[in-house]
């Protein structure tokens, strides 16, 4: 059995003292590959250095919607150049919209559209963060599709209800579930996890955040815990863990065009 954790942030300071042990744990849990997200381009070199240490890591480059204080139109070209600088860049992101307590919606939309353009030009998928903004997100994506053309991507750490989930499935997106799906109160997320087709579902940790049940007592989430997310989603969908793992791994490989070599036994 192999799993792909499609969204990690292991460049954060909390991982630096024991990253080798964290890697050993994810390998023991069957995690064959990880996609390292990026919240701002200044992280790029640190993320690249981590990928130099661990062959099973691919990564992205982008600007998170909660970092609009760093946005300038010139940043889009920087993201483009960084994406072209390393073959291990498999996506643009994370980007998107976060309207929770936001007063910069117009700026977020501008930055998101610019990063969609980069993804479209480079033929890369987008990793999308969407919080309290599903309807606007749908409208922005639909408008971009009509003006430029479709972009593939994933709605990461998805928390939407089934109706919203269907909007993004209809746009061709993958849907990724994090530890949130294991929370007792997350009934609408669980309903969404049950309805997504087997060819569009992904799993992630979004570590170091959102530690899943049964590891909620651990302050820091880690990639090995994607196993618990996968186990819970498999039970929701009434399939075996092996089946869910095979489906989500195949989907991650297809979306991010992950190298076959990363799916050998980890050293």
Image (cartoon, grey):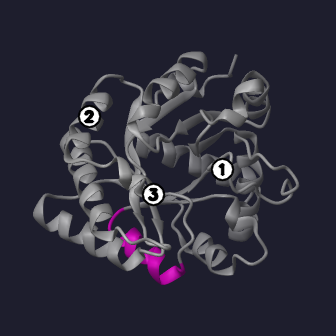
Residue 263 x/y as whole percent: 59, 28
Residue corresponding to mark 3: 66
Q: Are marks 2 and 1 in contact (CB under 8 Å)?
A: no
Q: Report which quarter residue 231 is drawn in.
A: bottom right
Q: Is residue 250 magenta?
A: no
Magenta segment range?
161-172
Q: Is residue 169 magenta?
A: yes
- First-in-chain label (3 vs 1): 3
Q: How many marks?
A: 3
Query: For numbered disc 2, what is the local secondary structure?
Result: helix
Mark 2 crowdedness (10 Å alpha carbons): few <14, some 14-19, many ≥20: some
Residue corresponding to mark 1: 205
Residue 12 x/y as whole percent: 62, 36
- First-in-chain label (2 vs 1): 2
Residue at screen point 74% across, 78% down = 185
> Disc 2 vs disc 1: which is toward the camera?
2
For the residues labelled 2 and 1, the Cα–Cα distance comes to: 28 Å
With 231 as the anchor, is 175 left or right in this view? left
* Quarter containing the N terminus: top right
Query: Where residue 78 is drawn, which disc sits there?
Result: 2
With 22 as the anchor, is 119 left or right in this view? left
For the residues labelled 2 and 3, the Cα–Cα distance comes to: 18 Å
Residue 250 x/y as whole percent: 52, 45
Main SS class of the magenta portion in the image: helix
For the residues labelled 3 and 1, the Cα–Cα distance comes to: 19 Å
Residue at screen point 27% across, 75% down = 139
Residue 148, compared with residue 102, is above or below; it is above
Residue 162 x/y as whole percent: 52, 80
């Amino acid at each position: 059995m192999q799993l792909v954790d499609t969204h990690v942030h292991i460049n954060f300071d909390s991982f630096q003292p024991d990253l080798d042990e964290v890697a050993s744990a994810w390998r023991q849990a069957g995690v064959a590959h990880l996609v390292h997200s990026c919240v701002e381009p200044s992280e790029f070199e640190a993320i690249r250095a981590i990928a130099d240490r661990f062959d099973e890591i691919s990564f992205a480059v982008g600007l998170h919607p909660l970092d609009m204080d760093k946005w300038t139109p010139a940043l889009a070209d920087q993201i483009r150049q960084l994406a072209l600088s390393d073959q291990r860049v498999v996506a643009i992101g994370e980007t998107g919209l976060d309207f929770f307590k936001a007063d910069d919606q117009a700026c977020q939309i501008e930055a998101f559209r610019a990063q969609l353009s980069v993804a479209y030009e480079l033929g890369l998928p987008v990793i999308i963060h969407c919080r309290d903004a599903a309807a606007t997100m749908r409208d922005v994506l639909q408008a971009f599709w009509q003006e430029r053309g479709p972009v593939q991507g994933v709605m990461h750490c998805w928390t939407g209800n089934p109706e919203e989930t269907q909007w993004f499935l209809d746009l061709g997106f993958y849907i990724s579930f994090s530890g949130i799906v294991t929370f007792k109160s997350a009934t609408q997320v669980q309903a969404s996890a049950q309805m997504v087709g087997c060819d569009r579902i992904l799993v992630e940790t979004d570590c170091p955040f959102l530690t899943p049940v049964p590891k909620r007592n651990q302050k820091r989430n880690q990639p090995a815990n994607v196993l618990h997310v996968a186990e819970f989603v498999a039970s929701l969908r009434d399939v075996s863990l092996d089946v869910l793992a095979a489906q989500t791994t195949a989907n991650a490989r297809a979306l991010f065009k992950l190298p076959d070599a990363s799916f050998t036994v980890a050293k």
